[in-house]
Image: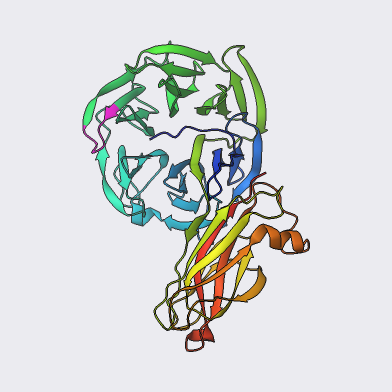
Amino acid sequence: MQPRFLTLAAACIATSSAVFAQRFVLMPDSTADKIVKFDASTGAVLDANFILDSAGVLFDFSTPKDAIQVNNEIWVLDQVSNQLVRFDQNGTHVATVFPATGMLSNIRGGCFANNTVYVTNDGTANGATGDTVVMFDTAGTRLGQFTVANTGTSPFDVTEYNGELLVCHFTSTNTTGRYDYAGNLLGTFHTSNGTTGIDSPEQISITAANTALMSGFAAPLAVYEYDAAGTQINSYPFATALRGVVELDSGLLLVSTTSNVGTYDRNTNTYTIVYTSTGCQFINVFDFGSSGPVTYCTAGVSTNGCVPAISGSGTPSVAASSGFTISVANVEGAKLGLLFYGINGRASSNWGSGGTSFLCVKTPTQRMGSANSGGTAGLCDGTISEDWLAYIAAHPGALGAPFSAGAVVNAQGWYRDPPAVKTTNLSDGLEFTLVP
């Protein structure tokens, strides 16, 4: 489903947990081999280097074409290297689906719908079949493919619309076909003569008014708008070949051309450039929703079978000097423990050979004050907790301090357990984003 979007913001709700939103726009820059991050309301550049090419380590961008949201991940589709590269919402690499595994060749656009990742495929290398849409589950396992040769050649984008899939074709009759989630042809959404209508459509996106936008790469150059029946209802002319288009929450269009990205005001027909590059590609909105601190990673099991569980309560506001407490419950009673945190993202590495714990926070880390877990020895009734904001206020030189709104922090609990590997064990991890 195409997500709705707003600016990256923080809204504090009077509950036991902080609530914040992570919403933005991403676009691959294939000239610089990177992913650029934009504000989802104004279109302003937030981070021109949000994800950079790793040059063959884990993945290697060649022509990143599209970036789509898959649950809480970012998937980048690379047209020439034919890789599907998965990242978490902070831009940290998760996994890569390589060409031979995915059986992909000359891929372009994709979407996530019906709990399935759909990717347009034009070529026949790497075991792929041309003029198809290839399907994957959320773990990157290939589920199969279906032909779209029954509506044209050179499929360029696939997008969910009104419970169906729209697939546009770059060549042939400029036809956009309608398919069900299994790939069965339902009919034609729109066919253009390429003279008075769209020619060589690239990206499809859906507006808040439930109309479909398409970017035209060849003359007549324009962004075209269609109603649910596939009837053209608007066109917005441009002087440069177009690649991507999406509607911002403000109602402006964010448009990518072969030379730049800009906002287009449909009321005044004005175009304002916000980013310049010859590699501007598809543009998509990302909405990771409103949520409090999230847990991740795996907690170790203590000698007496206790599985500690970390949580956060309160509001992690940079304007406050207290009021956000990190707690680790289900710790063995009467154990010495402490909390620690980092600012470089998540980790998941073995704490020790043969042990059950994982280090869930990337180094460097900052240890906080130690304390006894309380409770009863041998039972799982101990707790380690500390007001993180109070600690930062009392330690202005601590790792990352002073913090700014939007900073992401990862925390974990540690406690002594002499019979265990390294004589210690660890909780699961907690990730939270600081709000104003």
Which residue is at a point 36% across and 13% down the rendered structure image?
A: 231
Q: Is residue 266 above or below residue 46?
A: above
Q: State the predominant SS element of the stretch in magenta.
A: loop
**Where residue 406 appears, x then y in whole percent?**
64, 47
User: Height in image: 350 above or below 412?
Assistant: below
Q: As rendered, which of 72 and 15 lies closer to the eye? A: 15
Q: Is residue 323 in view from this perspective? A: yes
Q: Position of residue 422 (x, y in %)?
A: 53, 85
Residue 282 seen by the camera: no
- Is 25 positioned to the left or the right of 184 in the image? right
Report the front residue among 240 and 358: 358
* Residue 225, placed above or below residue 361: above
Q: Name the residue located 41 percent from the left edge and 20 percent from the top edge.
A: 211
Region in magenta: 178-184
Residue lying farthest to the right in this orientation:
397
Residue 94 appears left or right of 432? left
Query: In the figure, is residue 282 to the left or right of 171?
Result: right
Image spot of residue 393 (x, y percent): 74, 59
Q: What is the basis of the colouring in this image?
A: rainbow
The N terminus sits in image quarter: top left
Q: Point out the image quarter for the C terminus.
A: top right
Q: What residue lies at 62% left-to-right and 11% top-to-bottom?
A: 268
Query: Where residue 67 sits in the image (x, y, percent)?
Result: 48, 42
Describe residue 88's horizontal placement relative to residue 261 as left or right: left
Q: Is residue 402 magenta?
A: no
Q: How many marks on residues?
A: 0
